[in-house]
Amino acid sequence: MTTSTLKLKRIAVYCGSNFGISPVYAEGARALGTALAELGIALVYGGTHKGLMGVTADAVLAAGGEVHGVISQRLFDRGHLHPGLSRHEITPDMRSRKARMAELADGFIALPGGLGTLEELFEVATLTQLGDHVKPSGVLNINGFYNPMRAMLENMAREEFMRIEHVDMIQLDADPKRLIARMDTWEMPTVEKWFPAKPAT
C-alpha cells in the first residue's frame, strides 16, 4: 500500500470528545492520526481540540499531515475549535456539520466514542447500504471496544433485519494501516436489502 495507489484521499474520523477510561484509546487515536499522515490521507473531523478528536488531529499535524475541521457554530462560539488546523469551516448546526463531513470524505473511520460517534457511523453506513453514496466505513477496534457492536449487527442479520453483507460493510480492525488498506480495496455489496415476506401462519 503506497500513497500513490490509494483511492482514499480524505477520511472522516468520528470519535469521542472524551478520552475514555484507558490510555489505550488515546494511543490508538494517535496511531491512526500518524498512519493517515504517513499515507498522505487528509483527516476530516469535527474540528475540536477535545478528547480523542484532539488527539487524532494533533497526531496528523505532528506527522506533517493535513487536517480539515468542520465545526458547528455553537461549538465554535464555546471556544472548542482546534487552533492549529490546516483549514476549518463553520456550519450552522450539527446536521449540516455531518452532511459536510460526509461530502468531503472518501471513507469513514470510527474510533471509540459515545452516542454521537455511533450515530455518525451508522448514518454513513446506512447511506452506503441505500446507495446514496458508495464509500467504505470501518472502526478501529481498540481494546475490542466495538466487539459488542459487531455482535449486535450479526444478531440483526440472524433475525433477518439486515444482510450479513451489509454487516460486513463496517470493517473492524485494531491496526490502523491494515484497516485503511481493507477500506481502500472495499467493494460495494450487490445484494438485495429486503428479505422475502414470510407466509402468514
Image (cartoon, rainbow, N blue to C red):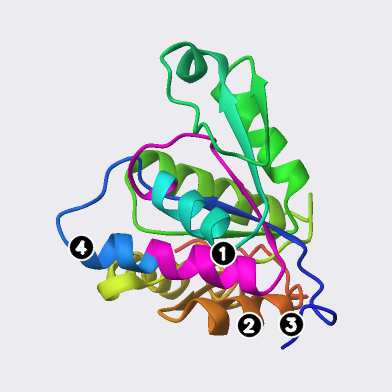
Q: Disc 4 marks which residue?
A: 23
Q: State which tag comes first along the sequence, 3 or 4.
A: 4
What residue appears at the point 33 percent right and 71 percent down from the top-left corner?
142
Q: Secondary structure at mark 3?
A: loop
Q: Disc 3 marks which residue?
A: 185
Marks 1 and 2, how far apart in space? 22 Å
Q: State which tag comes first along the sequence, 1 or 2.
A: 1
> In what quadrant of the picture does the N terminus appear?
bottom right
Q: State which tag comes first along the sequence, 4 or 1.
A: 4
Q: Disc 2 marks which residue?
A: 182
Residue 35, image quadrant: bottom right
Q: Disc 1 marks which residue?
A: 63
What residue appears at the point 78 percent right and 75 percent down from the top-left corner?
190
Callout 2–callout 3 Cβ contact below 8 Å: yes
Residue 163, image quadrant: bottom right
Q: Position of residue 110 (x, y in %)?
A: 47, 58
The amino acid marked with disc number 3 is Thr
- Point out the frontmost of discs 1 and 3: 1
Marks 3 and 4, how far apart in space? 31 Å
Seen in the picture, residue 109 relative to 47 is either above or below; the reply is below
Q: Position of residue 72 (x, y in %)?
A: 56, 21
Seen in the picture, residue 68 relative to 172 is either above or below; the reply is above
Marks 4 and 1, how far apart in space? 20 Å
Q: Residues within 10 Å of mark 3 (few under 14, many from 20)?
A: few
